[in-house]
Image: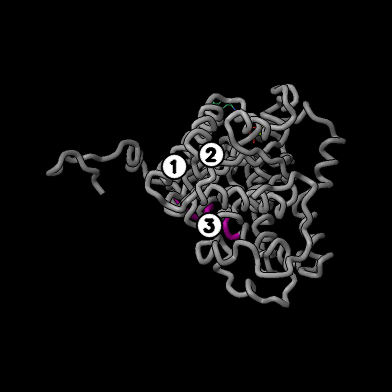
Amino acid sequence: MRVRAAGKGKTGDAPSRPRGAGRQGKADIGYARLGGGYFDMGEKMLEGLGREQLVHMLRLMMRIRHFEDRVFELLGRNVLTGASHVYAGSEAVAVGACSAVTGKDYITSTHRGHGHCIARGGDLKLMMAELCGKKTGYCRGRGGSMHIADVAAGNLGATGVVGGHIPVATGAAVACKIKGESRIVLCFFGDGASNNGSFHESLNLAGAWKLPVVYVCENNMYGMSVPWAKAAAIKDVAKRAEAYGFEGIVVDGQLPLEVRRAVLAAAEKARGGGGPTLVEAKTYRYRGHSRSDARKYRTKEEEEYWRGRCPILLFRKLLDEKGIFSQAESDRLNEEVVREVDEAEKFAMESPYPDRTELFEDVYANWIEGEKGLVRKS
Ligand SMILES: Cc1ncc(C[n+]2csc(CCOP(=O)(O)OP(=O)(O)O)c2C)c(N)n1
Ligand SMILES: [Mg+2]
């Protein structure tokens, strides 16, 4: 199945049974939990999704925005310390892509990874606690902003090493293939990472071995202060896929349904043994690279243009225009989400730090001599 390039797709009402509904079944992230809606033919649908599923996508995008805005505020007040790279502006990429895979699939994430974790259904309380270094966090406060992982939920984790996780994602895809599983891997990374050797080596093997992986490049036009246009001689990262023998697709990263459509087709292809796809989502980050970045390398006009293409505002407008979810309903949802973030912050603030005595736990695996050699102590 081929996917249309950015701008050519239509987000019209789907006339019949939603694409992927039966296939994704109960493992579908967040959607299965909602129940109902899938088979109601009288319901207004977009891209095969009914009202509840579409509103869930909106909720996830709002969660990411408000979580990130709060993180930025806490950094400003020095309540949160260390580096955090916020995802505001690119919500449609994580939410659109994660909506297209199942809960059994794996994802890998980046230094700008909070959005991926939330789109995957991550718990805001555990995330905020992790950012604050608290014992109740996803990694018991050991990982912080750039290293959130939830392996049990298929989130293989984020990394502060740019491009460092692309071989991890590719290796996970090798494992899926060897085991004959129907799982696939969704690998997020930035435009800057696509200039690293780890990207090229991974994509080369993924192409040669037809691995079940979907590479999602979030091209937000900059790697720190360096514009993509100065860091590479080609316009689209997606073009690089051709060199490794598979398809590269460009999508509008501000439209979640467009991202979803491309990733759904790529995931279907990967699951069916058709190998990898590189999906490049053109997007933007609203804040600086990190808190200390004054954004001197980009213009106000450029920022305003992209603010006008806010993925949440565009999606709200679409749902309203299609008679699916009114602006007033979106306002109420927005307030609900703000309360969720309030609760997450409260939970994190009230949580304890790990005890000093735990400092060396989880640093080395605990191996003991078993009957058949070394085994890991539980
Ligand atoms: C291997 C490595 N090189 C350099 C850095 C410093 N660094 C951190 S983020 C970043 C930019 C990455 O750009 P991109 O992949 O486009 O992601 P974005 O920050 O735009 O989301 C760089 C160079 C690093 N963390 N790791
Ligand atoms: Mg970038």
Residue 342 falls inside the magenta stretch: no
- Is 348 included in the stretch rendered in magenta? yes
Q: Is residue 16 above or below residue 203?
A: below
What's the residue type where badge 3 is placed? Thr
Q: Classify residue 257 as left or right of residue 80.
A: right
Quarter of the figure with residue 47: bottom right
Cα gap from disc 1 to disc 2, whole angstroms: 20 Å
Residue topped by disc 3: 102
Give the distance between the C-alpha atoms of the residues marked 3 and 1, in whole angstroms.
16 Å
Q: Position of residue 88 (x, y in %)?
A: 69, 45
Q: Secondary structure at mark 2?
A: helix
Sequence-wise, the earlier of marks 3 and 1 is: 3
Q: Which residues are magenta?
A: 343-352
Q: Is residue 7 left or right of residue 279?
A: right
Q: Which residue is mark 2?
A: 146
Look at discs 2 and 3 and give the one toward the viewer.
3
Give me the disc on residue 259: none
Name which residue lies at 63% across and 46% down: 71
